[in-house]
Amino acid sequence: MSTTRVKFCGLTRARDVEAAIEIGANAVGFVCYPGSARYVALETLRELAGAVAPFVTPVLLFVNAGDDSVERALEAVPNAMLQFHGDETAAQCARFKRPFLRAVRMADGVDLLDCEREYTSATGIMVDAPAEGYGGGGRSFDWTRLPAAAVRSKPLVLAGGLTATNVGVAIAAVRPFAVDVSSGIEESPGLKSVEKMRRFCAAVRAADLALETQ
């Protein structure tokens, strides 16, 4: 069966990290952008990193961060993947010589295939709805604007307004490599709901099964 990977992002408590992994998350995201309500300082980041089990990928999210900030975060989470949400060029994303995701806000006129060609060294492309400022806004976008899976050259991570209610439809429409959710599994910004995480993962697995049996 084809397996859609699940990334829970914006975690701020070790117990939420542990619950996410127990429920089935493949990756857990930590926001290193001070402008976010889900920002985690370096000391907290070290604590969260200690809760990440083997074979689960920690992901560090940055917005136009200086080299020192990224390097200090990597010292706290040495096995992390990087995720860039700002105005970073392809060279700036690649300069740390680490696997990275490039986030792309699907505003009018944005072409995913152009982004793939620009960020050739990216491990994957994350697509999100356009929002004011940086990061996600908890809203979905028109998934029909995305090119078919057959013509995409990089793993696609789908974000933007996903919940347990709509993620199955999203997977059927987009066929992403992974889905990313933050506000859709929260009680309040940064505080995750175990029940919402559980329902989200169950909906992803049900969508995968439905595609397999078509």
Image: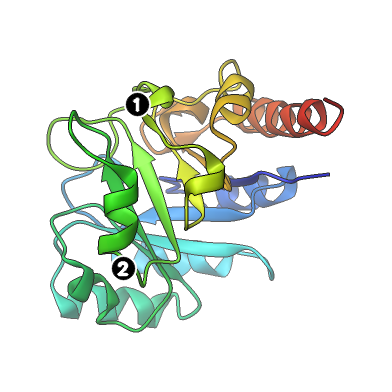
Q: Which one is in front in this view, the residue at disc 1 or the one at disc 2?
A: 1
Q: Which residue is mark 2?
A: 42
The residue nearer to you, when weighing 41 against 136, is 136
1 or 2: tag closer to the N-terminus: 2
Residue at mark 1: 138
Dot 2 crowding, Cα within 10 Å, few <14, some 14–19, many 20+: some
- Outermost residue to the front: 151
Residue type (three-letter) at the residue carrying disc 2: Leu
Visible residue check, residue 74: yes
Q: Secondary structure at mark 2?
A: helix
Q: Residue at x 46, y 71 (%)?
A: 80
Which amino acid type is marked by label 1?
A: Gly
Secondary structure of the residue carrying tag 1 is loop
Task: Give the quadrant of the C terminus.
Answer: top right
Using residue 19 as the reference point, say whether residue 28 is left or right of it.
left
In the displayed structure, would residue 193 be above or below residue 33? above
| Closer to us: 161 or 116 | 116
Q: Quadrant of residue 96?
A: bottom left
| Image coordinates for residue 193, horizontal then vertical, percent | 56, 30
The location of residue 39, given as percent across then percent down, is 28, 50
Residue at point 35%, 84% (across, down): 97
Q: Position of residue 160 (x, y in %)?
A: 39, 30
Residue 39 appears in view: no
Q: Is residue 24 left or right of residue 184?
A: right
Residue at horizontal 27 percent and vertical 34 percent from the top: 106
